[in-house]
Image (tube, rainbow, N blue to C red):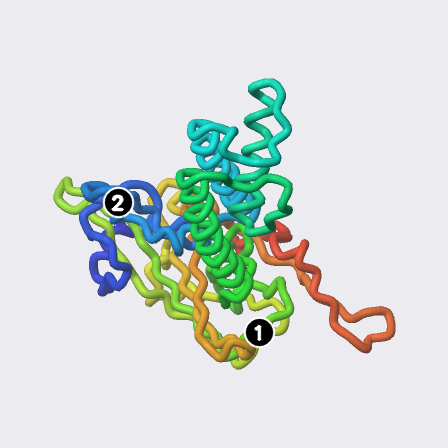
């Protein structure tokens, strides 16, 4: 209770875009992947989603499966049309069982859709030619869209930053500090990185749960270039909203540390951003990160061990 009374004296700054009323929101504010933890309802699904953004952000395996599924479904549709028109209107078909006939028109559809046109089967009659003409046109449009999506996924600038799994309450100078770290995991060049950290905490005010947001002061909130790992530090001083918190307070209080990072991608000449958050159970009390880079055998290069970004060791904070 003493902690919450002290928090009331600190000025909160709600630049998060979320409501202060805890009853109006549910769960964490920002997911680990940086996406807002929000589901939109009350409007048709087609107007709620940008399919271009959805397909660009979809995982590669799901994206490839989606593209292949659309390709198969469209060809099954056109194969069904040819079959209903009558395969006698397709010259060069090798007749057989119903399954054999359908596979023949399916493969003809695939050849028409992709404009390959091997030439063994050709449409005969107005309906068959009309369907094949429209299918070839749709195929050209579809592959143009698919090519654009592949290029967009390949060329979309990203930060390619990896965040530590946990934030730590670690020794810092003669006291404590909240720490987490980031590291670049690809060979892109980022410069002018800037980080902003906000703490959201749920408090009880006159029997009503309220979310308070506090901007955390950092030891360093800007660096010129991102080459190795960067441990971002919020010193827990008397001006910090975390001042006075114990291990039990961290565990028993609804806290979320919201991270926003932006930087300049030198190849694309544009700004890129990355977000994540840490909730109470992801904050480790009494620990410090282990070093994740070291020189190579002849000390001519520095090795950044990305698999060690989450490594930490427990420490005693009773002396701090």
Q: Residue at x 20, y 48 (%)?
A: 210
* Residue drawn at (33%, 41%) of the image: 27
Which residue reaches farthest left? 206
Where 163 sits versus 202, above or below?
below
Residue closest to the eye, 51 or 263: 51
Where residue 44 sits, quadrant-wise, is top left
Using the rendered view, name the quadrant where residue 42 is placed: top left
Which one is earlier in the sequence, the residue at label 1 or at label 2? Answer: 2
Where 194 falls versus 115 (above or below)?
below
**Occupied quadrant, residue 186:** bottom right
The residue at the point 49 percent across, 65 percent down is 156
| Residue 42, above or below 273 | above
Which percent across, then down, holds residue 293?
70, 66
Residue 40's label in the rendered image is 2
* Residue that label 1 marks: 226
Tally the numbered discs: 2
User: Which of pointers 1 and 2 indicates the residue nearer the eye?
Assistant: 2
> Which residue is drawn at the image coordinates 58% and 21% (left, top)?
99
Q: Does residue 246 appear in this view?
A: no
How far from the left and from the top, in percent, is residue 40?
26, 44
Q: Residue furthest toward the front?
A: 125
**Local secondary structure at mark 2:** loop
In this rendering, position of residue 227 left or right of residue 152: right
Density class for disc 1 (Cα within 10 Å; few <14, some 14-19, many ≥20) is some
Residue 302's place in the image compared with 39, above or below, is below
> Closer to the camera, 38 or 56?
56
Tell whether label 2 touches label 1 (CB within 8 Å): no
Tell me the element at label 1.
strand
């Amino acid at each position: 209770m003493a902690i919450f009374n002290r928090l009331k004296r600190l000025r909160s700054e709600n630049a998060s875009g979320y409501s202060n009323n805890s009853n109006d929101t549910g769960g964490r504010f920002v997911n680990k992947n940086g996406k807002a933890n929000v589901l939109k309802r009350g409007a048709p699904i087609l107007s709620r989603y940008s399919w271009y953004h959805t397909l660009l952000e979809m995982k590669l395996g799901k994206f490839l499966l989606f593209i292949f599924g659309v390709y198969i479904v469209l060809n099954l549709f056109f194969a069904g049309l040819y079959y209903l028109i009558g395969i006698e209107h397709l010259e060069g078909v090798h007749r057989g069982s119903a399954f054999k006939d359908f596979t023949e028109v399916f493969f003809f559809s695939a050849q028409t859709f992709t404009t390959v046109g091997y030439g063994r089967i050709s449409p005969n009659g107005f309906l068959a030619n009309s369907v094949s003409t429209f299918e070839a046109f749709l195929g050209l449009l579809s592959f143009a869209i698919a090519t654009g999506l592949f290029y967009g996924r390949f060329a979309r600038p990203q930060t390619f930053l990896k965040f530590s799994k946990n934030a730590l309450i670690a020794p810092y100078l003669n006291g404590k500090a909240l720490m987490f770290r980031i590291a670049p995991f690809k060979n892109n060049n980022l410069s002018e990185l800037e980080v902003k950290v906000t703490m959201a905490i749920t408090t009880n005010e006159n029997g009503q749960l309220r979310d308070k947001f506090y901007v955390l002061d950092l030891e360093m909130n800007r660096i010129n270039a991102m080459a190795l790992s960067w441990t971002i530090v919020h010193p827990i001083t008397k001006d910090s909203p975390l001042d006075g918190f114990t291990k039990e307070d961290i565990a028993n209080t609804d806290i979320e540390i919201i991270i926003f990072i932006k930087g300049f991608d030198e190849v694309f000449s544009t700004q890129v951003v990355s977000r994540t958050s840490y909730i109470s159970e992801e904050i480790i009390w009494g620990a410090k990160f282990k070093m994740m880079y070291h020189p190579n055998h002849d000390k001519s290069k520095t090795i950044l061990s990305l698999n060690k970004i989450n490594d930490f060791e427990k420490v005693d904070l009773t002396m701090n």
